[in-house]
Amino acid sequence: MIGSRIKLARKKAGYSLRGLADALQGKISAQAIGKYERDEMTPSSDVLTALVKALDVSINYLLDSQQVELTSVDFRNKSNTTAKDRAHVETEVIEWVERYIEIEKILEMPSVEWQKPFDRVPIKSVEEAEKIADDLRQKWNLGTDPIPNMTELLEEKGLKVFVIKLPQSVSGFTCLVQGSSIKNLPVIVVNERFSLERRRLTLAHELGHRLIDPEYLSPKEVESASNRFAGAFKAPKSHLKNEVGSLRHSIGYRELIYLKQMYRISGAALLVRLKNIGIISDANLTYAFQTVARTWRSTEPEPLETEEQRGSQEKPCRFERLCYRALSEDLISIAKAAELLRRSVDEVQAELKGESQSKDASYY
């Protein structure tokens, strides 16, 4: 297992085998590093220390006692993502998942398969994704009201949600975590750089990928079906028609803003949703994007978060909450909590006592 960790960390750092050997100042050869990566040799303790420093990873990451690995990693827009970018993100996710699993074990809350509502549903058209969204809402007893916090909902249902800075070309991705104590645990990774509206769309879109069986669809249709699922899940047809009416020939700016704030979706996605369920026509949609919504595909109207607030709303909280729970119950030390949360001991101490005045601290 250490071989694959060294290889991934090397790619994250952007080194070739020879480049890493040079960074280690000749301590070991490129050939030896290749043997480590193929698990043909095991690095000594002093070599491990040198690798940790050169690759900027933790010793725990390289040693990996939990045997955690990511499978079925599916980057959206992968053609625009470099191998170095993908390796960097995968390394970050693995380190975070290991810390997450560790705190769950400390609290005797084993990571298990998520609360899958039903098996993947095979569909033969994009429109059929609408029913999957309705069935999921019924299975999860959500009714038809707007979902106030998408992240909290998915965490509650057993999905791991991780928000980090991704390359600008990637809105998010989904993967499965395998390990000695877990199997096929879904993780959804969302780009922190994007707006709250876009992050919520990504979460719902990736949830759709977990529920739609793509057997009868082309890759393009799968993406369209996941978007259709996301729209239906966030703004159910019956609720939206009750708010807007069954058929509209025009909708003004302020009404659209109120609706996007109610459903917490982007203005452009709202217009597409209105068209998809027949409230407005194709011609109405085209006219809207030529007039009142002409900039909405690139600039969000009256965003739910300002630039200064970016990433402050609907943050994943469960991992952090579990760490403070374990700390309060004396199951871990403050030093251990700081290690898990990637914060300083002083920050953790202040948060524990309620003395921190800063709202900017975050884990990664």
Image (cartoon, rainbow, N blue to C red):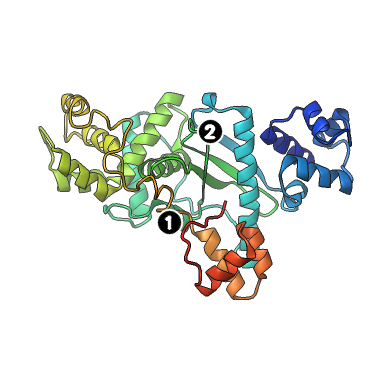
Residue occupying the point 30% across, 47% down? 264
* Residue found at x 46% / y 60%: 359
Q: Quadrant of residue 108?
A: bottom right
Mark 1 lies on residue: 152
**Residue at left offset 59%, top offset 70%:** 349
Are the two marked residues, 2 and 1, in contact with CB atoms closer than 8 angstroms? no
| Residue 281 in picture, x, y percent from top left | 17, 28
The answer to whether any part of residue 1 appears in the image is: no
**Which of 362 and 112 lies nearest the eye of the viewer?**
362
Q: What type is the residue that disc 2 sits on? A: Phe
The answer to whether 236 appears left or right of 210 in the picture is left
Between 185 and 87, the one nearer to me in the picture = 87
Q: Name which residue type carries label 1.
A: Glu
Residue at the image position 62 percent from the left and 56 percent from the top: 342
Query: Is disc 2 placed on a helix, strand or loop?
Result: strand
Rendering coords of residue 38 (x, y %): 81, 33
Q: Is residue 318 left or right of residue 181?
A: left
Q: Height in image: 86 above or below 197? A: above
Viewer can see residue 111 = yes
- Mark 1 or mark 2, which is nearer the start of the sequence? 2
Determine crowd level at label 1: few under 14, some 14-19, many 20+ residues with C-alpha closer than 10 A.
Answer: some
The Cα–Cα distance between marks 2 and 1, rounded to whole angstroms, is 23 Å
Residue on which the image places disc 2: 75
Please give left or right for residue 217 compared with residue 30 in the image: left
Residue 334: image x %, image y %? 65, 69
In the foreground, 201 or 345 = 345
Q: Is residue 12 above or below residue 259?
A: above
Q: Which numbered disc covers residue 92?
A: none
- Mark 1 falls on what kind of element? helix
Instruction: Return the x and y of residue 240 as percentages of the image width and height.
Output: 21, 45
